[in-house]
Amino acid sequence: MKLIILEQYDQVSEWAAKYVRNKILLFNPGPERYFTLGLPTGGTPLGCYKKLIEFYKNGEVSFQYVKTFNMDEYVGLPRDHPESYHSFMWNNFFKYIDIRAENVHILDGNAADLPSECQAFEKKIQDAGGIELFVGGIGPDGHIAFNEPGSSLVSRTRVKTLAMDTIQANARFFDGDLSKVPTMALTVGVGTVMEAKEVMILITGGHKAFALYKAIEEGVNHMWTVSAFQQHPQTLFVCDEDATLELRVKTVKYFKGMMHVHNKLVDPLPGSLKKN
Amino acid sequence: MPSNGSVSDAPITQFINCRILKEHTLQREDLWVRDGRILDPEKLFFDEQGYADRQLDCGGAILAPGFIDVQLNGGYGVDFSTPSEDPGAGVAFVAKKILEHGVTSFCPTLVTSPPSVYHKVLQRFSFFTARCEFQSGGVHGAGVLGVHLEGPFISLEKKGAHPEQFLRTFGGSGGVNPLLEVYGGLDNVSMVTLAPELAGSQSVVEELSQRGVTVSLGHSVANLSQAEEAVQQGASFITHLFNAMLPFHHRDPGIVGLLTSNRIPAGRSVFYGMIADGIHTNPAALRIAHRAHPAGLVLVTDAIMAMGLPPGRHTLGQQVIEIQGLHAYVAGTTTLSGSIATMDMCVRHFQQASGCSVPEALEAASLHPAQLLGISHQKGSLEYGCDADLVLMDDQMVLEATYISGVEVWRK
């Protein structure tokens, strides 16, 4: 595991975006060779998307040969509802970049047969050759995607009933009205994300400090589903100072001491800035 | 490149790198057009998995709805009210020229004329607009949204430049019969300016409104309660506010009082035309109207045939006109012979004079006239599904290009 500690949200966003950019460039995707990227929604990745759009506009990266797979979507929420994850991805990322619609995959929460929609999603990931890089965020209770506390750590894409905490937290997006918040979602499983070649998890803010502590300093535990990634061979946690508040000084110092090494991962690639 | 949609095979144009006027603000968004209409790109992306066939770089400019002029009497030496061999040709000529002022649709306006002129001209207009409800615009010129008939049922005292001998009253027959008689028909008529104080006006206003003709109050000495009554019968517009009506008086504000009247039926709004050329309306009066009722302000040019002609003396019909700067005088005098304002100039002047925002100024020449004519689902805004009638302009609102149905029809 790598733990990248940066000062604030903006630096986290920029670092993560540069990492994604470099991964795509190093992969050297083409018509016969698509880069597969797993994507989250929510407030945490927003800054990262903004940076990626900037890189695209500067000609530093293209998404022409990128296939994306989103983590989750609400059940029963109309696709064009402003809070649907389809709308989120369109309004915050896809409409600004050169990705083709046929390469975008988001679970359909309005499918007639939800279990087969989930199975089909797993199959699409497989057919695309698995996921190169899965980017994720977590909730304060340590959930990744909608894998709420207690979810199986080998779970696959499926229908999930949301925890009361999540419904209450999301009410702010639905006029503060609990009855308007969807109570179910489709989500990739912990096992689905575990199969990605690489996983990058963004964690910012003091309210997520305890979850980060549970994720990396305590044992693997299905009540903190993000802790499963301790057993993933290639995981990065990218966090800000506030998110480290519950960590041991020793842990923080150790990883900060390695920043000069880790920062090389996001250096501009030779020649990549000379395009355009 | 062949297109990709499952809904339509028409090619898709994406205007990029622009600031579009939407929801009353300038937004950094792309604008997508297919089949001449503005497309919802999110639906295209998720429902059709489609993409644009070509991208048009706007270089950071403002992209706004095309202007709509509901009061234009002529221009470039053409007077719509003067019968000619082919009135359609005159309108078509002006329609083409005003593309360079950002006007993508307009109402050719006829001032008070004898019945024979109405019959002849309207007949030709009807020929001109026969194909559909209104003549759609294109490379050939701005679209015609029906004719605006200003008179002859107006006040003698406030006739302005209208010829006195042709003024009419409604007579006793009731309803629109006198209008049908004088005009020869109401097909292709979108607006009638009349004086509501004339006897019998109630049933005329009511019937015109029911027929979908916009009733405008003007060239009138009506007091406020007469004006309010006309609005309650269906009138929705005031022709060139302040001009050719009683001046504002605090004990009877007259037609001007409609701007702040509390007797407008719920859910309705009164619009008012403004000639914002800096000559026909004092900037202070413009500001009073704008601050009292910003959502009703409709910019009109009310331009006459001298509009578009170069400075100097011109013989137009029976008149000799001298153009100096923005003024058109009856030659040898200081009598104004009418407005020679262009719509883009009015938009800029209105913004400077009123201190309003750029979006507000643009909407006064697009959204508001469209709402007035009841066509805001189709024109005057950049909402999905609307016609892609567009103006491209810099931050000073100086025009760079005009588009109708997504097709470039003029470029500087």
Image (cartoon, coloured by chain):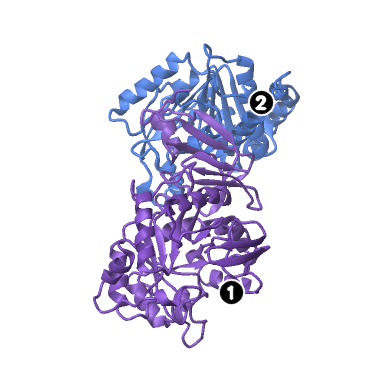
Q: Colour of chain A?
A: blue
Residue A119 quadrant: top left
Q: Residue at x 52, y 46 (%)?
A: B390
Q: Residue at x 65, y 56 (%)?
A: B310
Kind of residue indicated by mark 1: Ala
**What residue is disc 2 on?**
A60
Q: Secondary structure at mark 2?
A: loop
Checking the image for residue A72, the label placed there is none
Question: Residue pushed farthest left?
Answer: B173
Q: Position of residue B14 (x, y in %)?
A: 52, 35
**What residue is disc 1 on?**
B285
Q: Colour of chain B?
A: purple
- Could you tell me which quadrant the N terminus of chain A lies in? top right
* Label 1: chain letter: B
Say few, some or many: other residues with alpha carbon within 10 Å of mark 2 (under 14 / 14 to 19 / 20 or more). Answer: many
Taking the image as shown, residue A272 lies to the left or right of residue B232, namely right
Q: Secondary structure at mark 1?
A: helix
